[in-house]
Amino acid sequence: MRRIEEQLRQALRDGVNRPSRKPFYWGGLKGYQQLEAIGQALRTVSSAEPHRAYCRQLLGQVERVLARNRASAEDLQAAHTWLRRIAACLRYPATDYENIAPLTGRQVATEMEALLKTFHPDFKRQPAQSALYHAWHLLWRTWGPELLPCYDIAGLPQDNLALEALFGHLRRHQRRISGRQSTRELRRFGQYQVRFLAHSEADLHRQLQQIPFADYQHQLRCLEAAEAPQRYMRRLHRDPLATMQDLMDRYVGCLTAVSPDPSSPTDTERSHTS
């Protein structure tokens, strides 16, 4: 039960402090939606029974956070919707529009100007949409003409992300072979790395057989325990509602196992009836 409560608190902390560096992926909005899923899962188990007081107290805190940030979340959701409309106007990313007839830069500019005229947020009550409004107008007026040639020149990419990814891969590879700095990719191999010097496959197989099976099982369990938090967070980000509902079902099962059944007679009642 303590492990489940720790995972629940971890999900709450992740929802409040949700980072994001991916395009069109906003951490604050995703974190709010994750808190909504946590609150929905907590409502299913926060009954009036005494042994569920922890869930009731936690649900009250989650609902206060949701109520206090609901207006900001709605504003952020609307801004995110408009950002998606801008991306659709630019046909970005290009992989999502491979089967669409090619456009010219003039057509994209005309659609963008029409979209700009329809966006009128409330500058006093909608700060997220206001920030998007000013940034959108500034960038389009300043760099809009620089973006249009990619629609007129075949093979010219819309961004340089592929080139930056290639440079990043080469940089990380150089760090690995030089040993100057540690990289996060090394963590995927677990806590230990073993190197063998063998002259043949049979020689390598003989060296592997010298490792005690009990030690191998122990290290395998350590590796699974170390990767369990990462698997939990990946599942939480992919489907927060199903993950939290499964966690609450396990929590209810633990509560049922440790708490007495109200319908069953107690020891005092049994002594009186006997």
Image (cartoon, rainbow, N blue to C red):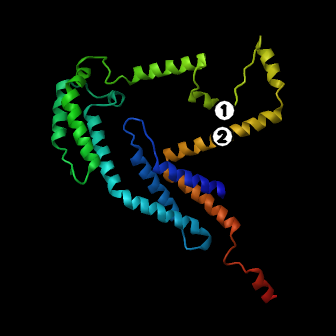
Q: Position of 219 compared to 162: left or right?
A: right
* Residue at the (36%, 22%) spot, across then down: 160
Mark 1 sits on what residue? Answer: 190
Residue 241 place in picture, x, y as percent: 49, 53
Q: Quadrant of residue 103?
A: top left
Q: Are marks 1 and 2 in contact (CB under 8 Å)?
A: yes
**Observer able to see residue 130:** yes
Against 99, is 238 above or below?
Answer: below
Q: Quadrant of residue 201?
A: top right
* Residue at the (47%, 22%) spot, across then down: 168
Against 173, is 44 above or below?
Answer: below
Distance between mark 1 and mark 2 Cα atoms? 8 Å
Mark 2 sits on what residue? Answer: 226
What amino acid is found at the position of numbered circle 1 in the picture? Gly
Instruction: Name the secondary structure under disc 2.
Output: helix
Which residue ends up furthest to the front in the rendered image?
180
Residue 217 place in picture, x, y as percent: 77, 37
Q: Position of 45 compared to 112: left or right?
A: right
* Residue at the (21%, 34%) spot, across then down: 138
The local crowd at label 2, few if under 14, some if 14 to 19, many if 20 or more residues have their Cα within 10 Å, is: few
Residue 152 place in picture, x, y as percent: 22, 19
Total marks shown come to: 2
